[in-house]
Amino acid sequence: MIKVTVWNENRHEKKNPVVRDLYPEGIHGKIAGFLKNADYEVKTATLDEAEHGLTEEVLHNTDVLIWWGHIAHDEVSDEIVKRVQQRVLDGMGLIVLHSGHFSKIFKVLMGTSCDLKWREADEKERLWVVDPSHPIADGIGEYIELEKEEMYGEHFDIPTPDELIFTSWFEGGEIFRSGCTFKRGNGKIFYFRPGHETYPTYENEQIQRVIVNGVKWAQPADRKRPVYGNAQPLEKISEKSL
Amino acid sequence: MIKVTVWNENRHEKKNPVVRDLYPEGIHGKIAGFLKNADYEVKTATLDEAEHGLTEEVLHNTDVLIWWGHIAHDEVSDEIVKRVQQRVLDGMGLIVLHSGHFSKIFKVLMGTSCDLKWREADEKERLWVVDPSHPIADGIGEYIELEKEEMYGEHFDIPTPDELIFTSWFEGGEIFRSGCTFKRGNGKIFYFRPGHETYPTYENEQIQRVIVNGVKWAQPADRKRPVYGNAQPLEKISEKSL
Amino acid sequence: MIKVTVWNENRHEKKNPVVRDLYPEGIHGKIAGFLKNADYEVKTATLDEAEHGLTEEVLHNTDVLIWWGHIAHDEVSDEIVKRVQQRVLDGMGLIVLHSGHFSKIFKVLMGTSCDLKWREADEKERLWVVDPSHPIADGIGEYIELEKEEMYGEHFDIPTPDELIFTSWFEGGEIFRSGCTFKRGNGKIFYFRPGHETYPTYENEQIQRVIVNGVKWAQPADRKRPVYGNAQPLEKISEKSL
Amino acid sequence: MIKVTVWNENRHEKKNPVVRDLYPEGIHGKIAGFLKNADYEVKTATLDEAEHGLTEEVLHNTDVLIWWGHIAHDEVSDEIVKRVQQRVLDGMGLIVLHSGHFSKIFKVLMGTSCDLKWREADEKERLWVVDPSHPIADGIGEYIELEKEEMYGEHFDIPTPDELIFTSWFEGGEIFRSGCTFKRGNGKIFYFRPGHETYPTYENEQIQRVIVNGVKWAQPADRKRPVYGNAQPLEKISEKSL
């Protein structure tokens, strides 16, 4: 059984009644709920817990970590970021949602600014599937339509994704690479754009399906970390005079 | 349960006692055997059957097709090649083994010559894992070593693979991209190099494991083929005077 | 000096006065014009010439071939298609424009149906640059806007492009991967979407700039075709008892 | 004229007479020499200069930065690393050589450990061209052979390269992805493996040619950095009741 930890900064929920009404158990509670229904073993962790809820033990027992953050990226300690990065290199899957594009962990793993255009204008988003063979698009139609979402527009300052699964159309005239995968070490990363806190995006069954599929895809392969450092030859090396 | 069809031209087995001794049930029989042990639903098909054993019905009931061919590529009818290509675009997985690099179906799907360097000299091959996050490398160590294999060397005239999982070292001085994935339409393709008919390569448990993993990876996503052709607008298009 | 051949089926120009008025010298004449201004050595070739104007000699003296076709793809002979494919594998660059997505040569090089959604509705297209580092986007702003174009929508049934440079937003609600590169053998391929025959798209200076950049990018590297076939070892292979 | 800055930590040259004999003007001096012969405008910078020789002004006047470091990676200040990273995102090309795989700047841009296997055993390296279409392989034969080099072996802990141009065969039994490109923001990065300080690798004309080609490939496109942040809509957004 795949072990998932859903991490949320859980701040909008405390400050903003609109968000609290939409997600009375927090965004992490909502996501944990539909992942449990998909038969994953799910826990949650939030910023204000000790070590942000991401102790060595928690991470060691996490196959796939889901990350939602927005207004408190800077409050995440650099030490925990390093710990999460190491776990990804060791094989843990990581799913970064929406405003998590600006989280320390995503920026550190990408090596770029991860910047983008944005706008809050109650506008329509249509996420087109551009890779119909991908398991993350399993069970999804040609596109997912969201009546109202925040706009994210290109250029999205990320490295070339290993795979591009969704590209969004926005009513206001922009497009965005909204479903992207990356590999880092033994670990797999999926960035998925939708999920602004003031919209009921995580109620949408197609969005839920994508995240459920993402967890399955991001689970670690059964492998040790490769051996690095000084290595003995596997074959005889000839003596050379020169 | 994933439905696999193992296709083999099955000619070396009839002509060459060395091959028959190694694979008394044919290369297809050998591969079908270890795939059954992995709990797949497995059938076989060979060149000399009617329609090469690849009727519309067989292909329709195949999730993943495995292809082994060598000396009789030209005897595969163009009509069957088109049929298999269409099934791949519709979502069927395809695993092309060893000398299948020169099969009509692989060449048609790649668009290139698929040519390479080769040599039969009982030489050592070491397949290094270069993508430790990939599910096809699940359970495999840092490399797989084969005491004797045919050499295939670069340049391998294929399009840039979507993913490169294995790269081979050969005793005689060459390297080769020996585990490559490609996507075509709704379908996923895995090319895996080892498996010359005069060596017991498919007895090797690590090689078996890679093929078992490959089948799981290549299974179709649950999706219809996208809708193509003339499309009505999803949004209102403004009238333009110009 | 880079030698360019602009190929056009040149049929709309003969039948449709709208097209003839827009492109009195043919689409090929228009494209050849701005490429000459960019200091390339430019020739043209059209469907109704002997061997479609693509003799062995012409192709041998072409560094980059530009392809525009639409209503007469089937009239291009299979022999010429094979000849062009071989030249691409040998190193010639190929730029496929707009409806050329359905040309025999593009389909053969891709291995897929190359199908898509389409609509003629005088709608706005906005091509966003998603790879700002790419030389094909040199001198281009954040996007190119075309007041009226034919719509092409996803899913575009091509292999995963090696590079994705432009993605289009369409007024009617679709998006499209509109600037894609591919490698085949020693040759480089650039597909660029815009250019419907009833719009003055090739008058647009930004579109011209992209095609000028594309030619420079697609020029052959100074290399011979790799050596394929049976190869002598470069290192001593040990004797094996087993 | 492309402006190149060759950066070297320049420490082995001071401490080790073998290195000083091989490269009396330093590794940077050697590289600067053959780049000047290729008609680039070339300067050098070293670790012990003020700001490591990489002032804002120097970087602003650099199109392509070449990086050689080994034993003093930790002495490079984090501030300068950030400055170089920002210049890469702004468009400057970066060529990282050999032991530069462990430099702070490369690790920050990759987001991974950049670790690998290594061995100093005077062994033969053969770099095979696996992408014959690439301009960085222009003028290079099927492979480059180096009689003696340090071995670097897989797994090389980098993100999937955007392009893989060379893969090395080593006498002792390993392989390595030895010529890799990456994009970060507006900038292009080329990692090239050879160049251990105790071997005359940078005397090799084929190695020189690859670096000369790399500079040309890595030069910035003529583009501003994209606009990021809050964005006004380009199209009218409909009022929504829901």
Image (cartoon, coloured by chain):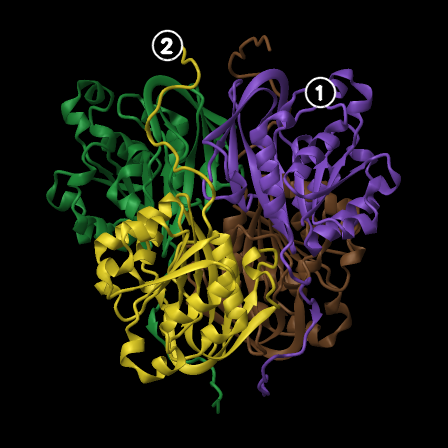
Chain colours: A yellow, B purple, C brown, D green
Choose top left, top right, bottom left or bottom right for residue C27: bottom right
Query: Do dots 2 and 1 share one subunit?
Result: no
* Separation of residues labelled 2 and 1 (CA atoms): 41 Å
Residue depicted at x 59% and y 85%: B236
User: To which residue does mark 1 refer?
Assistant: B22
In the rendering, at what x and y percent does residue D130 appear?
A: 52, 35
Residue depicted at x 51% and y 60%: A39
In-front residue for pair A187/C106: A187
Q: Which amino acid does label 1 sit on?
A: Leu
Numbered disc 1: what chain? Answer: B
In-front residue for pair C50/D75: D75
Against C153, residue A199 (above or below) is below
Disc 2 crowd, CA 10 A, few/some/many (<14, 14-19, 20+): few
Q: Is mark 2 on a helix, strand or loop?
A: loop
Choose top left, top right, bottom left or bottom right for residue B12: top right
Against B123, residue B11 (above or below) is below
In the rendering, at what x and y percent does residue A156 appear?
A: 40, 63
Disc 1 crowd, CA 10 A, few/some/many (<14, 14-19, 20+): some
In-front residue for pair B109/C79: B109
Label drawn at residue A240: 2
Residue D52 horizontal side relative to residue D30, left or right: left
Residue D127 horizontal side relative to residue D94, left or right: right
Residue depicted at x 37% and y 68%: A28
Numbered disc 2: what chain? Answer: A
Against C121, residue D210 (above or below) is above
